[in-house]
Amino acid sequence: MARDDFAKLCHLAGKAIIDYKMIQEGDRLLVGISGGVDSMMLMHVLDRLQKRAPVGFELFAVNINEGFEGLNHTPLADYATEQGWNLKIIDVPIADLIIDKKAEGRPCGLCARLRRGYIHRYADEIGANKLVLGHHRDDLCVSLLMGLFRGTGLKTMSPNAPADHGTKRVIRPLCYAPKALIETCAEAYEFPDLGKCDYADQLEESGDRARLERLLKELESDFPNLGNHMLHSMQDVRPGYLLDPKFLNPDNQ
């Protein structure tokens, strides 16, 4: 990783934080860490910004151990200790619950709901007012396509959204950062190998999100700078040119 790459990633995160008013003085941030490169780089970025930001904020991290046989969370705990991160690993029997609920065909929905509940509970315990997630620009693009293709509305992952009945906010500082930049930066770190979710191969082969991620890469070869163009379009919403009747104003000439 060139030093310039990490500086660029920090710059994009800092710009997003300012643009979407993500962090204020006195915030207690709880970062969700999966062990993947996105959340690991997010923690490194926030660790650097904490030392340089004009506002003071506290930084905590949480990881959910779902109980999958293919995952080992011990190396993550060791890495966090080496970095001086305040990481809490919470053991949750999600793997067993997926089987009990016969959700093996579509495990992500149940897993996500359970993880979210335990993360919010821990946030309440430590008084964290904001949850920080490692979703990046490409994740936002894929989410936009998923809503469009499934007919669930023109929507994506908000950079700064209310959560838990308005008691907290969910923020995504990497929303401007392309996946490729994050992966390039991660090459300079020796991140621990936790293994993979028991359903990883299934989701990669037939999951909607994985399929749309592949489609986005294919489209980028025909539409240069596609990711940034989609990001710009998400920042330039024109309701009057869509079909939602709520925005119809026939008297406006």
Image: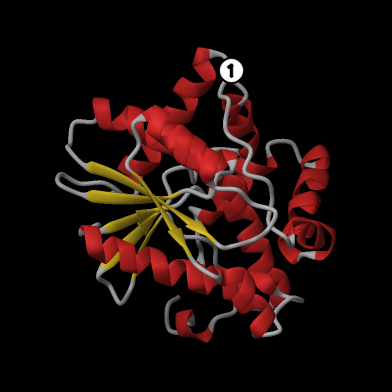
- Residue shown at 25% from the left, 70% from the top: 167
Q: Can you see residue 45?
A: no
- List the residue tagged with mark 1: 1
How many residues crowd around disc 1 within 10 Å: few (fewer than 14), some, or many (20 or more)? Answer: few
| Secondary structure state at the residue bearing disc 1 | loop
Compare residues 50 and 189 and report the one nearer the observer.
Answer: 189
Compare residues 230 and 23 and report the one nearer the observer.
Answer: 23
- Residue shown at 23% from the left, 58% from the top: 126
The answer to whether residue 186 is left or right of residue 145 is: left
Is 117 above or below relative to 248? above
Colour convention of the picture? secondary structure
- Residue shown at 59% from the left, 17% from the top: 1
Q: Position of residue 223 (x, y in %)?
A: 77, 41
Q: Position of residue 209 (x, y in %)?
A: 71, 61
- Residue shown at 59% from the left, 38% from the top: 178
For the C terminus, the quadrant is bottom left
**Among the 4 quarters of the image, the one containing residue 111:** bottom right
Q: Position of residue 214 (x, y in %)?
A: 80, 50
The answer to whether residue 13 is left or right of residue 40 is: left
Q: Position of residue 44 (x, y in %)?
A: 42, 32
Residue type of the residue flagged with mark 1: Met
**Among the 4 quarters of the image, the one containing residue 153:** bottom right
How many numbered callouts?
1
Q: Can you see residue 34?
A: yes
